Image: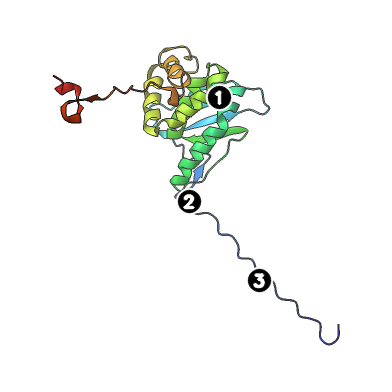
Amino acid sequence: MTGQAARQPHAMPKTPEKPAVYAHRTLGFGVPATSDPHHFVVQIPRGNAAPVLICEHLGMGSETTREQVIDRVMLERHRWTAIRAEVQRAFNARLAEHNLATATWKVGDSPVDRLLGKELCVLAWAIERLDPEKIGIAVRNWLALRPEERWWMFGMTAMATGGIQDGDKGWRVALRYALGDHAQNELLKPRRLPEKIGPGGQTALPLFED
């Protein structure tokens, strides 16, 4: 080229991305980053065969300092694998609604908020000895429940049969049938009565029949 070299346009400096601002700092799935909060922990060993343990850490709210952890349920690895993705998606949607950081399951200890942990236990209890072919049904039915319904189920079950060895007792068995037996769209639906036409062509209600 003749004359001065063609001037190259200057690249615009990149604006650094601002870090996300959350309602407050959390660990794992919504656990407040405070000193010893009440929460749950999902212990995921390395490899693909070892079972997964879900335990409840009572934290500063525990009545004694000696009994601070309750082992709630041990899931065979294939059962955990069958539910982990849907549970993660559901929990992250809830966290995002409250402007909290989302999370993923990791090898080792995954902390879980105390309310979300109760909901996770309800599903884990329902599938711990369920026919593997019905686990998908249990997940769909669990997703259809409101959080308050899951908390109530946890409270009723944990009261007497919430330990790791209680899988075939009381409410644990009831959860298995409640969530794993039929899909929500297969539940009993009311039948429609045929309409009865009264004098003058008007629909007659059974209460006012002659």
Ranked by sequence position, the earlier of labels 1 and 2 is 2
Query: Which amino acid lies under the numbered mark 1 shown in the image of this protein?
Result: Leu
* Label 1 secondary element: strand
Answer with left or right where residue 42 lies relative to residue 32. right
Instruction: Identify the residue at horizontal 68%, vertical 27% (top origin).
Output: 47
Ranked by sequence position, the earlier of labels 1 and 3 is 3
Q: x and y percent of residue 119 in the render?
A: 44, 30
Query: Which amino acid lies under the numbered mark 3 shown in the image of this protein?
Result: Met
Q: Are marks 1 and 3 in contact (CB under 8 Å)?
A: no
The residue carrying mark 2 is: 22
- Could you say which is closer to the camera, residue 56 or residue 202? 202
Instruction: Identify the residue at horizontal 29%, vertical 22% (top origin).
Output: 194
Q: x and y percent of residue 28 in the render?
A: 53, 39
Tell me how far mark 1 sits from mark 2, CA to CA.
29 Å
Let me know if residue 202 appears in the view.
no
Of tags 2 and 3, which is closer to the observer?
A: 3
Tell me how far mark 2 sits from mark 3, CA to CA.
30 Å
Marking on residue 12: 3
The residue carrying mark 1 is: 53
